[in-house]
Image: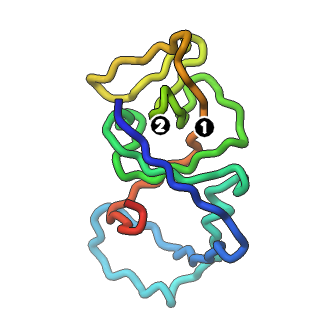
Amino acid sequence: MDTFTILLYIYTVEDIYMLRLINIRAQAGISAYIAAAAECSSLGLNLDELLIDDPTSTYIGIADGQSMTGLGIYSGDILLITRATEVKHNDIIVCDLNGEFLCKQVDRKGGRLMSAAKGYEPYTLRPGDDFQVEGVVVRSIRLHRPVSDLV
């Protein structure tokens, strides 16, 4: 099974950063001049408020491996994980299975942990497994340029 690296992030008031949302719609191919950001109308946007429902129960993980690509999670992606929500059938979770951190889709009805890529078989939980859900993945963020401090 692919591994999953966990990083703890502690939220404080000082961690709130304001970004400006530029009111521009962009296509994959840009064929015209786009005005400078300062010339565009803008709106305050707080990424903490947008992405994190409960800062005291949320932590950040970095995905490592290819087993969840079918659900859009790739190696190096940032995952926002919460302990503030109940695990539901087919949720993507982070768990500790026999001492190994994993990111998997949970089949609550069948008692299985499922990958989302070809070549990975579901894992059926067995008596004697040391299994603990650490949280539910509620957001994933793709980094197109890796952040050296995170990896």
Tell me if 76 is positioned left or right of 12 in this view: left
Which element type, helix, strand or loop, lies under badge 1? Answer: strand
- Residue 99: x %, y % from top left: 48, 32
Q: Nearer the viewer, residue 13 or 34?
A: 13
- Residue 14: x %, y % from top left: 68, 77
Tell me the amino acid under the disc marked 2: Phe
The correct choice, above or below, for 95 with respect to 139 in the image is above
Query: In which image quadrant can residue 72 be found?
Result: top left
Q: Are marks 2 and 1 in contact (CB under 8 Å)?
A: yes
- Residue 109: x %, y % from top left: 59, 12
Residue identified by numbered label 1: 134
Tell me the amino acid under the disc marked 1: Glu
Q: Nearer the viewer, residue 100 or 77?
A: 100
The correct choice, above or below, for 42 with respect to 64 in the image is below
Q: CA distance from mark 2 to mark 1?
A: 9 Å
Disc 2 or 1, which lies upstream in sequence?
A: 2
Query: In which image quadrant can residue 85 be found?
Result: top right
Tell me if 135 is positioned left or right of 73 in this view: right
Label 1 CA crowd tier, 10 Å (few <14, some 14–19, many 20+): some
Residue at 48% across, 22% down: 113
Residue identified by numbered label 2: 101
Q: Quadrant of the C terminus?
A: bottom left
Label 2 CA crowd tier, 10 Å (few <14, some 14–19, many 20+): many
Residue at 65% across, 51% down: 58
Q: Quadrant of the N terminus?
A: top left
